[in-house]
Image (spheres, grey):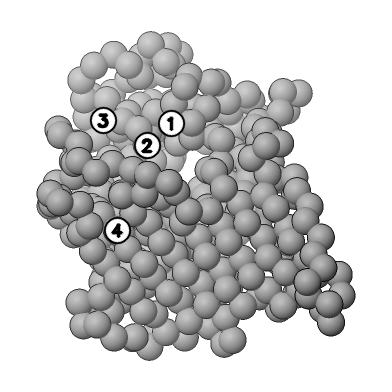
Amino acid sequence: MSEIRAAVIGFGLAGRVFHAPFIHAVPGLKLEAIVQRKGDEAAKAYPDTRILRSFDEAISDPSIQLIVVATPNETHFDLARQALLAGKHVVIDKPFCATSAEARELIQIAVDKKLIVAPYHNRRWDGDFKTVRKLLETNALGRLVTYESHFDRFRPLPREGTWKESANDANGMLFDLGPHLVDQATSLFGTPEAITASVRRDRDTTGIEDAFDITLHYPRMQAICRATMVAADPAPRFLLHGTKGSFRKYGVDPQEPALVAGKTVPRVGDPRVWLAERQEAWGTLTIAPDPANPGVLDKTQVKTELGDYRDFYANVRNAILGTAPLTVSSEDGYRVIRLLELARQSSAEGRTIPV
């Protein structure tokens, strides 16, 4: 298999934790270059990778086939557009774009040039989400009535010196964590019939939307996506209720914390497991064996499926080679951004909006 040479644009949290390690670990992809405008962190982490100081160097290099945009949110559209026009395949860290109109333009350019443009909705490869998907596929909960998904944090004071706290419609929790939660829900249940949302500023001082509650309405079922920065005692990461019982799961997928702590992602094929969750973090399935006797319940721990962000990039590799469709398509990226726009509109107008 010939290697697809990739350049990661940016070496902040996204480039350093979510992109470079997984590209480096997937056979058939080569981490050819990292664009870091200043500093030597990328060179120390990847001594065999070229370090470039400008985006133009990356898109003008004919050997680079894949550009990964891991820069501040407001730059995603412009950089991705330039890369596509230069004939490069593109992966865009979330959010895919700041507006659905921008997303549609990128999709059209990619179609015209026969290139792929993929949103980095890597949370489909979280172990806890894969566990939820398996429970639903096996009908363990019966007919699902409520799906609730949280990303809760406790950061009551704004962080200084970061673009993530700067006032811009592309920043804030809605466009930071919202893409993950909404993409997970829609990948399970499809496009909702309607949306109701509250998008807020809950902290005493903040320049961004720092909390949201989004309800996606489906026939006989609701999917609720929530995030806040003022949860000292977080809610369950997932809480599902069905006609047979419930599933509750606390904690977050261990891949990000492990990488932040300096753990190395093994190459695909390495016998080391990446990355099993400790047993005490597994979720709990509560089932009524006899629905006619709902007071008698069975509680069991459910082993968390292995999460693996390497699978996202393995799929991107296959899509570029033409051997598989994108698992997370550009249309998926468009749908998420459009739903986030509708969530903001629903909140502003105080009403449920048809989708």
The N terminus, quarter of image: top right
* Mark in the foreground, 1 or 3: 1
x and y percentages locating residue 144 in the rendered image: 66, 75
Q: Residues within 10 Å of mark 2 (few under 14, many from 20)?
A: some
* Mark in the foreground, 4 or 2: 4
Whether residue 217 sits left or right of residue 349 in the image: it is right
Residue linked to disc 2: 14
Residue linked to disc 1: 17
Residue for point 15% across, 34% down: 160
Residue for point 15% across, 51% down: 204
* Above-or-below relation of 287 to 194: above
- In the image, what residue type sits under mark 2? Ala
For the residues labelled 1 and 2, say whether their Cβ atoms are less than 8 Å apart: yes
Q: Which mark is residue 57?
A: 3
Whether residue 113 sits left or right of residue 53 in the image: it is right
For the residues labelled 4 and 3, say whether their Cβ atoms are less than 8 Å apart: no
Q: Secondary structure at mark 1?
A: helix
Whether residue 205 sits left or right of residue 250 in the image: it is left
- In the image, what residue type sits under mark 3? Glu
Residue linked to disc 4: 211
- Mark 4–mark 3 distance (CA, rounded to whole Å): 38 Å
* Above-or-below relation of 219 to 150: below
- Mark 4–mark 2 distance (CA, rounded to whole Å): 21 Å
